[in-house]
Amino acid sequence: MKRVKILATGSYLPERIVTNKDWEEKLDTSDEWITTRTGIKERHFSSDDQATSDLCIEAAKRAFKTTSIKPEDIDLCIVGTITPDHAFPSTACLIQNALGMRNIPSFDISAACTGFLYALVIAKNMIENNSAKYALIFGAETLSKITDITDRSSAVLFGDGAGCVVLGPSDDDTGIISSNLYSDGSLEHLLKQPAGGSRNPATLESVRNMQHTVQMQGNETYKNDVSKMGQAAVNVLKKVGLTGEDVNVFIPHQANLRIMQSTAKRAGVALEKVYITINKYGNMSAATIPVALDDAVKDGTIKKNSIVLFDAFGGGLTWGAMVVRW
């Protein structure tokens, strides 16, 4: 079976930067408290008139500048996001139209912070079975739109951004080597947006009670995050006869610096191989891995034949990992 590889990367961060000092002025918190517990120093927030599709479109334009592949060559568009422009139409359909792509399959998937990996696996499978040749895959969020800015424990965590990749067939042994995806709906209560869907439609009361914002049980989420991300990394490496020592660059979901470090230790990956962006971008849910990937490609951290490990965990609960030979 032909291998599928990442042919181009792109990312876009909104211009507005919100620092820990900005949060000090609004909440009972401090730069020291935020930095010590999360590793975050600043994050980007979208403007009032910027939606998730706007960020994606800019990220895609940057990706296309780095490859000979054009929008009209794309056969599939998938967006991993929990902050779509609308419940419907999909954000992917809006992007398909804005970029002038053909009438290709375009859809969103909701797997929270694991959304980008879910989308990659779907696209990889479609390319392998000849349903598509080139795919445009996004992880993108405007979490500032669904954040309770009065909640000291969660408001400081989140940021906005979009990252994307162009996928296509590989002509050598580089590309996606292995992946695994998981979910456990019995733990849905740990991380969720309670209102706005068919279970709890929007009402004046639900808006007053901030039920349209991210709700998280921090301690329990943390415990599950570390154990499940660590095991996913071990499992995906073991499937192809690799260990943490073989990994050149580890790009985990950027939710918390301590979680990332603990996950690396469990996977046997040296801490100096962990690629960190949480300090400047915060937690961008599905966008964290593709944005970090684009940074790592641009600054030369990822080189030809590098073994790159992705690992993510999010609401659902969902989690998974992927190994790529660059």
Image (tube, helix red, strand yellow):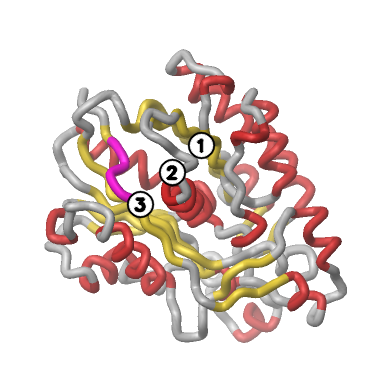
- The answer to whether 324 appears left or right of 106 in the picture is right
> Mark 2 near mark 1, Cβ–Cβ under 8 Å?
yes
Which numbered marker is on residue 320?
A: 1
**Mark 2 highlights which residue?**
117
Q: Secondary structure at mark 1?
A: strand
Screen quadrant of the N terminus: top left
- Residue 152 image position (x, y, % from top left): 79, 69
Residue for point 53% across, 72% down: 196
Q: Is residue 136 visible?
A: yes
Residue for point 70% across, 72% down: 19
Total numbered labels: 3
**Mark 3 highlights which residue?**
9
Q: Main secondary structure of the magenta part?
A: strand
- The answer to whether 279 appears left or right of 196 in the picture is right
Residue for point 49% across, 68% down: 13
> Mark 3 near mark 2, Cβ–Cβ under 8 Å?
no
- Residue 86 image position (x, y, % from top left): 40, 73
- Depth check, front residue: 257 or 226: 257
Q: Is residue 180 visible?
A: no
Is residue 256 inside the magenta stretch? no
- The answer to whether 32 appears left or right of 71 in the picture is right
Q: Amino acid at mark 3?
A: Thr
**Real-space Cα distance between discs 3 and 2?**
15 Å
Is residue 6 inside the magenta stretch? yes
Depth-wise, is mark 1 or mark 3 nearer the camera? 3
Residue bounds of the magenta highlight: 5-9
Screen quadrant of the C terminus: top left
